[in-house]
């Protein structure tokens, strides 16, 4: 399971011209699922994301988590995080899970993230054409792959 985490001032998801969800200060988490991902990957990643110390403390040092700052989290599914560009110029998505596996994993990720932060997690809608708007704060953008645990 791969995540791309962006510290944001605000973020929103619009589908077919209608606002689906929005957050203020917090994290936009893009999530990609592959078939080998497990419940353990979800739990490890959610705990890691919820406790990442990437928000400034009173001294301007990135030393506080989204939980400590009472920030919000928006989770958006993004199969393209598993793009392979090894051959040619057209990315292959062969490692990204199909919806029958990816949807339950995405939903479980969102539920676990809500448990980790103790509040509602805002989402996009799996498999739709979403317009994601954000104001990256910093910019701070972090990539985490549960298979590498880096």
Image: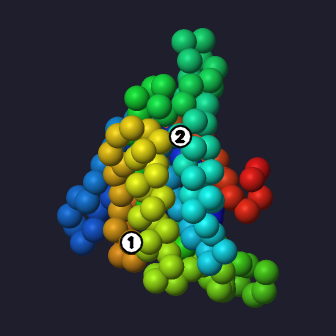
* Cα gap from disc 1 to disc 2, whole angstroms: 22 Å
Residue under label 2, please give it: 50
Numbered badge on residue 61: none
Q: Residue furthest left?
A: 18
Q: Residue at x 44, y 74 (%)?
A: 103
**Can you give x and y, in whole percent of width and height, for residue 31 in the image?**
53, 62
Residue under label 1, please give it: 126
**CA neighbours of label 2 inside 10 A, class few (<14), some (14 to 19), many (20+):** many
Above or below, comparing residue 36 to residue 50 in the picture: below
The residue nearer to you, when weighing 127 against 106, is: 106
The residue nearer to you, when weighing 116 against 60, is: 116
Q: Residue at x 49, y 33 (%)?
A: 66
Q: Quadrant of residue 111?
A: bottom left
**Can you give x and y, in whole percent of width and height, for residue 146 in the image?**
68, 58
Q: Residue at x 22, y 67 (%)?
A: 17
Which of the marked residues, 1 or 2, is nearer the chain's N terminus? 2
**Can you give x and y, in whole percent of width and height, for residue 50 in the image?**
53, 40
Task: Name the quarter where the N terminus is drawn.
Answer: bottom right
Query: From where the camera sits, is residue 11 visible?
Result: no
**Can you give x and y, in whole percent of width and height, for residue 133 in the image?**
39, 54
**CA neighbours of label 1 inside 10 A, class few (<14), some (14 to 19), many (20+):** some
Please name which of the two marks, 1 or 2, marks the residue nearer to the observer. 2
The residue nearer to you, when weighing 136 against 67, is: 67
* Discs 1, 2 touching: Cβ within 8 Å: no
Q: Residue furthest front?
A: 39
């Amino acid at each position: 399971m791969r995540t791309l985490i962006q510290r944001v001032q605000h973020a929103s998801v619009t589908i077919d011209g209608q606002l689906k969800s929005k957050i203020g200060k917090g994290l936009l988490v893009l999530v990609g699922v592959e078939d080998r991902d497990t419940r353990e990957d979800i739990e490890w990643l959610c705990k890691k994301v919820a406790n990442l110390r990437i928000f400034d403390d009173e001294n301007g040092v990135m030393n506080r988590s989204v939980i400590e700052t009472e920030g919000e989290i928006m989770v958006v599914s993004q199969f393209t995080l598993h793009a392979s560009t090894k051959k040619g110029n057209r990315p292959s998505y062969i490692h990204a899970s199909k919806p029958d596996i990816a949807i339950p994993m995405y939903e479980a990720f969102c539920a676990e993230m809500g448990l980790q932060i103790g509040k509602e997690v805002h989402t996009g809608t799996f498999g739709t054409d979403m317009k994601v708007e954000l104001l990256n704060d910093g910019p701070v953008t972090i990539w985490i792959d549960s298979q590498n645990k880096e």
